[in-house]
Image (tube, rainbow, N blue to C red):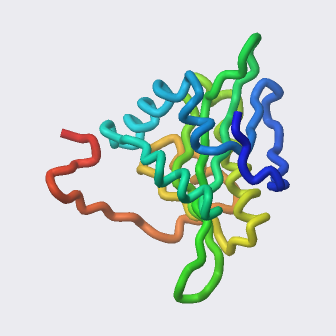
Amino acid sequence: MTVINEHLDVAVPVIASEVEVQPVSFRAILDDPAAPALLRAYAEECLVPDAEPQIAIYESMEKANVIQCFAAYYDRPGTPLLIGFVSILRTIVPHDGHHIAAIESLFVDPAYRSTGAFLMLAAAAEQFATVSGCRCLLASARIGSALDVVLSRRTGYEKTHNQHTHWLNGFKGGRA
């Protein structure tokens, strides 16, 4: 497993003893044997069934220190099983000079959502944004998605904006 930002001091609360969340590179997620099925399920839930992770872009962003990924592993005999991931973008807002963070992706295999992995990954994102000096952590969630449900119940998250989507070039977000 490739861990990036080894100096990263993010204490992720343990909700379920059989789940561990670790900072990793995006490549570590992609190279995991469970990744293809997990990424397909994520793409379907996000209404982007033709999603193709842009590996070179992720790698460039990691080198520029503007993205951090965390992976959730379920402890099973032999090899830990990748069950979820979160990636957080961190940038400076040009008009005011402050850092903000945004959840680029957050997903846990539906079969493992009862383990607390989703909440642990959200906590890792929050901790990373806090430790990185960000003013806020933004999250865009499809209405009714698992992320939308979790964030609407989570303390400290406030719905401040509505996101409206105008589909272009024949794309309808995975819907016919």
| Residue at the limit of the structure toward the left, as seen here | 170
Residue at the (37%, 35%) spot, across then down:
44
Residue at the (36%, 41%) spot, across then down:
51
Q: Which quarter of the picture shows residue 158?
A: bottom right
Q: Which quarter of the picture shows residue 125?
A: bottom right
The correct choice, above or below, for 87 with respect to 165 in the image is above
Asked whether, in this view, residue 168 is left or right of residue 10, the answer is: left
Name the quarter where the N terminus is drawn. Answer: top right
The correct choice, above or below, for 124 with respect to 159 in the image is above
Asked whether, in this view, residue 160 is left or right of residue 82, the answer is: left
| Residue at the limit of the structure toward the top, as seen here | 77
The correct choice, above or below, for 95 with respect to 57 in the image is below
Asked whether, in this view, residue 56 is left or right of residue 47, the answer is: right
Q: How many marks?
A: 0
Residue at the (52%, 41%) spot, across then down:
146
Q: Position of residue 49 (x, y in %)?
A: 32, 37
**Which residue occupies the foreground of this view, 74 or 175?**
74
Q: Which quarter of the picture shows residue 119?
A: top right
Name the quarter where the C terminus is drawn. Answer: top left
